[in-house]
Image (cartoon, coloured by chain):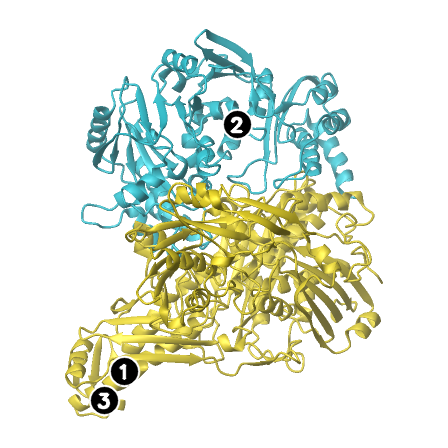
Chain colours: A yellow, B cyan
Amino acid sequence: MSSNIGVSHPHDSAPLHASGTAIYIDDMPEPRALLHAYIGLSTEAHARIVARDLSAVRTAPGVVAVIAAEDVPGVNDIGPSLPGDPIFADDVTEYHGQALFAVAATTREAARAAAALAVIAYEPLPAILTLDEALAREDARVLPSRLIKRGEPETAIARAPHRLRGTLRIGGQDHFYLEGQIAVSQPGEQGDMLIFSSTQNPSEIQHLVARALAVPDHNVVCETRRMGGGFGGKESQAAIPAAISAILAALTKRPVKLRLDRDDDMVLTGKRHPFRIDYDVGFDGSGRIEGIDFVLAGDCGFSPDLSGGINDRAMMHVDNCYFLENISILSHRCKTNTVSNTAFRGFGGPQGIMAIEYVMDEIARHRRRDPLEIRRLNFYGDGPRNVTPYGMAVEDNVIGELVEELARSADYAERLQEVAAFNERSDWIKRGLALVPVKFGISFTAIHLNQAGALVQLYTDGSVLLNHGGTEMGQGLFIKVAQVVAEEFGIPVERVRVSATNTSKVPNTSPTAASAGTDLNAKAAQAAAHAIKQRLAHVAAGEFGVPPTAVIFANGEVIGGRRRMRLAELAKLARMQRVSMSSTGFYATPKIQFDPVSQTGRPFYYFAYGAALAEVEVDGLTGEYRQRRVDILHDCGKSLNPAIDLGQIEGGFVQGAGWLTTEELWWDASGQLRTHAPSTYKIPAIGDLPPIFNTRIYQSGRNRENAIFRSKAVGEPPLNLGIAVFLAIKDAVMAFAASRRPCSLDAPATPERVLMAIERLRAGGAASSDEVPVPGTAAGRPPDAEAAE
Amino acid sequence: MRATIRFLLGAHARELPDVDPTRTVLQYLREDEALCGTKEGCAEGDCGACTVTLAERDGRGGIRYRAVNSCIMFMPALDGRQLLAVEHLADDCGGLHPVQQAMVDHHASQCGFCTPGFVMSLATLYMAGDNPGRDDTADALAGNLCRCTGYRPILDAARAALAQPARSGDEATISLRARLDALDTDSETLAVEGAGRRYVAPRSLAELTAILTREPSALILGGGTDIGLWVTKQHRDLPLTVATERVAELRQVTDTDTHVTIGGAVTYADATARLAALHPAIGPLIRRIGSRQIRERGTIGGNLANASPIGDMPPLLLALDAVLILASADGLRRVPVTEFFRSYRTTALGPGEVLAAIEIPRPAAELRLGVYKVSKRFDQDISGVCAAFAVTLAEGRVQSARIAFGGIAATPARAHAAEAALNGAPWSAEGLRAAMDAIDDGFTPISDMRASAGYRKLVARNLLLKFHLENPADLADAIALRLDLAEGMRA
């Protein structure tokens, strides 16, 4: 069989990573006369800037240039799809930490020291600092609200034998890519600008910088070899350092490096959207949902950025694996005076899945059933129980069998008994178990982004240079696409070199996002390689005296009839015969369409599935918890590279669990983020890994759509598996109450939130009285999560 | 007196004049040596991307290897040592080190930015000849954050690479030792001046106190795991630092029948074994202080002298009734640790005075000791609450109780009212109640990003209960406690 497809090739940069020779932007040799930039940040959440005295900054030692809003040659806005993200705040600052001005100096220290000399006078304006405040004010929206509705939810809920209402709050998440945001801009002749940017979206950097510099796109080139992590945080946010360094470079005619330190990075750039979810659900005695009403309030921060798509995706994931016949999903895109929230692995999907999984858990508590039983009961089935709220038929559903396989292999039923028995005899330590299924839609919901281009070149020594629009952030995209190209040419993957992503090689690309990097770019690269191969086949056919269709490319050789030659020999021959060995390739995802007016269509090419079973132990005296065991089964279709995919599954799971447990963003009363470095913001460490951690790729997986070699996208879906840890903690918390009364637990479930939830259970009475919204908020929800039968 | 710093960079000797004493080793590697494999992830010693190895003479003819955070380590700390960065691991032919090869084989890197740091943490174990189990490996990696892999493949790589650690041969050790001996005679005072800043590393306590008398504005520098951040995060200018790490008297740990005495410049790592041997409750606490990299440089003396209200050592030392020995040019004086912390970030240390040693009484066999650290994340986090309980029982009653907390007041503090409530009371659920209420009444903690005031108070109370649960007076007490708790828990 193939030595390229389905094989666990190491990441193409693995030896470079391990030896410290992989070059990130800050590691590149510095060009002559390089300047270092530093950004001056706002210290008010919402204020009019009444005076901005930068004179001391300009005269500080080493300073070469100082710029603010009025110095932007072109458009002072880097909103990715809608305006609203100024490079520099002009007369009003809208969050604590917003960029006000920038300094370029001969050293980084000099630039930083100079920036501290700025004198900014503010006139504070009323600031909206919490999502609840924003939700209560109908004018506090970055975008209009949206509604997806199917069936008769009001009636179905009202008529259902049982009804639960409640509120769940989910915190945001910082990307905490280990490599902070960075860009180096080098001015060239006639207005040219070469930008090295740690970005998931080089084309957008090119376009936004061109607009900011008031030059045509063709003057600007953006190159990205690799990122030290992205996770969505470098989809739109990388434009901030790129634009600022480019403007300074254009102004000074010197190269400019802008590297954000960790604190500035976390304060200045966007994060995962916090959500408030209000639900109202009616169900029958068995736990089958008859009608459900969700109000999803997303905290978008001060500007739209990518919030439209993110909130759309949240709406399209509240169904997760369940058929919800009568449903209303109302989505508010709330504006607060905080940093503009942005893409983060899952892009709103995880918040949607959290919403329905929380509800499933609450229904199970209410019915005193195993939550898995309630989930199975509500799974999508055959038509007509297979249509999503947005009108797409789920045709590739494997969740039922996948969950059964996981439950069987991880001894779910036995462990349910064991946990119950343990909890019976243990008073202040309780265990909890949760099995969470995941279905995740693959494709950009902005249909036009589902395209990719590639450029493949074969040289006369038989080596191949591959370039495509996708960017490498650690996810293994480059090796996967190289495997596909190698397979096309029938050569070992080592013969294919992937070069840095560069907007002058492949233009007008989409961000590497939405898990679609491989799906899109591998197909485009395959098309390019195929085009070259076709031409070579004709050359070989002439040489061998066989029809072109009889020419085979395999094992580094080209075979026709009884004749064969090395690919390198054929390449030399092709050159002699004046045949092109360079080709672009292009791919556009088929089948997808979506009508934004009716909110229906087929936004996703296919779905990826997975499930996780987590077991935790909670200390009822401190709220501390540990994961004891995690079992994961995940569907990658026919995996292109099982080792790379396994890495995405495990890493995604851990990142998802971090989001919902220890990763807490904390703003003070003035709107200042106080968790802006790893000393205060706690992503999972190695000790948080469960001692038993079994992750497997679903062996029956096969993409029923014609995705590249029948594989499936794997970047984002597994992040949702972390929800199992959260719900296992909730399960353990519930075990502290004999009466199984409902109890709210918000995310992240820090030890503090866990202990307070246990305390509420112990105190009895209104289960969540101290965390519920005031009555009469815009959402109009009653103040507690008690059964309202 | 020597004004240059001398060290080995890999195999190469370096002697640098005019070194800025607060320049970090990370800056030096990346900017001066163009060794860019070592990364800056946070500049505060919390992510481990900057991890490098320091090799130093262990005082017994061997070499001690330490993984340290280069982002917060100042240049003069290199003096007399060997600095190894990720670039120094490859063999002469450029082949990957076994640790590096294992990282490749086990798919243990994704974005790769944290990888050199993990490699150096593991290579440090490898060079030291350690083959730790999973828990100890995880301990050694608790200060290395990875955002991509979820860590499992890194643990697998560690297991594979460390299964056959090739201890560097005796010959290599002897040769390295000889080279380090040649760099530093152990007698010269290092006095570095650069970029308008001065640094002095005296060799004796007498010399140290003389300098402090002469230069009252000098900042005393221990391992720099806190002071490093004053520079990298607060961008403060430190015109004169005086290091304790070369002062022979301050680096000693002495054991007697009644006490363990820890020199003021002894690092956590170097004191762990002796402290852990005092009582089983102590080792697990120390393991959770900072990370391996921090404990290799951070000193217990520094943790006390900086008087942070959230330091993890003070509650334990308060509960054990430790005595601090302070030194100045006038001589030594003994201050009970209970009298050391005066107010927020203020101690009993006078001008020209330095913390010379910590004298910890050996816990009596009958002492029941419990130490608890509660934080958002289990490893490498700063406490919301840290508590230490030391109780002696006689016939079911409390004979003496010492209770101390960190994180619930402006200084690490004894809970005197709770102690009073316990003394003489029966060691039972009933007897505990007044003490728990006294904890409630006695403290007004703050709310911040780590924990709310309400949570801190509740946890402080509950930890006393937890300590009791783990130390019942007898079987009857244990059963009674269980019943009592079961009732309370089952609302």
**Quadrant occupied by the C terminus of chain A:** bottom right
Tell which subunit mark 2 falls on.
B
Q: Tell which tag, 2 or 1, sits nearer the viewer.
A: 1
> Looking at the image, which residue sits at the far top?
B330
**Would you say residue A663 is visible in this rendering?**
no
Q: Quadrant of residue A376?
A: bottom right
Q: Are marks 3 and 1 in contact (CB under 8 Å)?
A: no
Q: Position of residue B276 (x, y in %)?
A: 48, 26
Q: Position of residue B368 (x, y in %)?
A: 61, 23
- Separation (CA) of disc 2 from disc 1: 68 Å
**Quadrant occupied by the N terminus of chain A:** bottom left
Total residue callouts: 3
Pointer 2 residue: B282
Q: Secondary structure at mark 1?
A: helix
Q: Tell which tag, 3 or 2, sits nearer the viewer.
A: 3
Residue B32 or A117: which is nearer the viewer? A117
Hey, what amino acid is under mark 3?
His
- Separation (CA) of disc 3 from disc 2: 76 Å
Pointer 3 residue: A538
Residue A615 or A135: which is nearer the viewer? A135
Q: In the shown orientation, is residue A217 left or right of residue B416?
A: left
**Would you say residue B117 is visible in this rendering?**
yes
The crowd level at tag 3 (other Cα within 10 Å; few <14, some 14-19, many 20+) is: some
Pointer 1 residue: A533
Hey, what amino acid is under mark 1?
Lys
